[in-house]
Image (cartoon, rainbow, N blue to C red):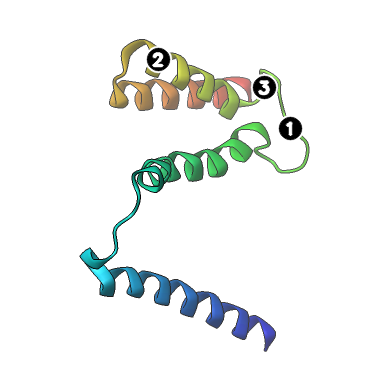
């Protein structure tokens, strides 16, 4: 029963937060400093999600070796992105390296 109330509370809080922003609309303005800080939220959230999957793909201890296909593909993605700034090429190259590394090492 406690699980139900926790889920219900989280859903209600999420709903109220979003509804409040939508209801107030243009009447609320953010300071320039807060706007600048909010621009970094997507990058921060993606980093928090992706980093554990890359460094410890099986959970537990970090796997910082060349047998980790997620790590190798991520390094490839960083390199291709830095050199070309082309998103589709970065994705294709990283996926190619990931699958080649994963199935070539098996």
Residue 29 falls left or right of residue 55: left
Q: Is residue 77 above or below residue 22?
A: above
Residue 56 falls left or right of residue 97: right
SS for tag 2? helix
x and y, in percent, of residue 22 in the image: 27, 70
- Residue of label 1: 62
SS for tag 3? loop
- Residue of label 2: 82
Q: Is residue 73 above or below residue 30?
A: above
CA–CA distance in space, label 3 to label 2: 23 Å
Mark 2: few, some, or many residues within 10 Å (few <14, many ≥20)?
few
Give the residue furthest to the right.
61
In the depicted view, which residue is nearer to us: 100 or 28? Answer: 28
The quarter of the displayed image where residue 70 is located = top right
CA–CA distance in space, label 1 to label 2: 25 Å
Q: Quadrant of the C terminus?
A: top right
Residue beneath the point at 63% across and 39% down: 52
Earlier along the polypeptide chain: callout 1 or callout 2? 1
């Amino acid at each position: 029963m406690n699980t139900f109330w926790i889920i219900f509370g989280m859903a209600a809080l999420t709903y109220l937060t979003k509804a409040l922003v939508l209801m107030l609309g243009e009447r609320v303005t953010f300071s320039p400093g807060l706007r600048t800080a909010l621009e970094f939220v997507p990058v921060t959230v993606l980093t928090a999600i992706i980093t554990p999957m890359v460094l410890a793909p099986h959970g537990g201890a970090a796997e910082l070796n060349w047998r980790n296909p997620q790590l190798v593909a991520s390094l490839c993605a960083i390199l291709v992105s830095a050199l070309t700034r082309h998103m589709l090429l970065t994705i294709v190259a990283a996926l190619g390296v990931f699958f080649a590394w994963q199935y070539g090492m098996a």
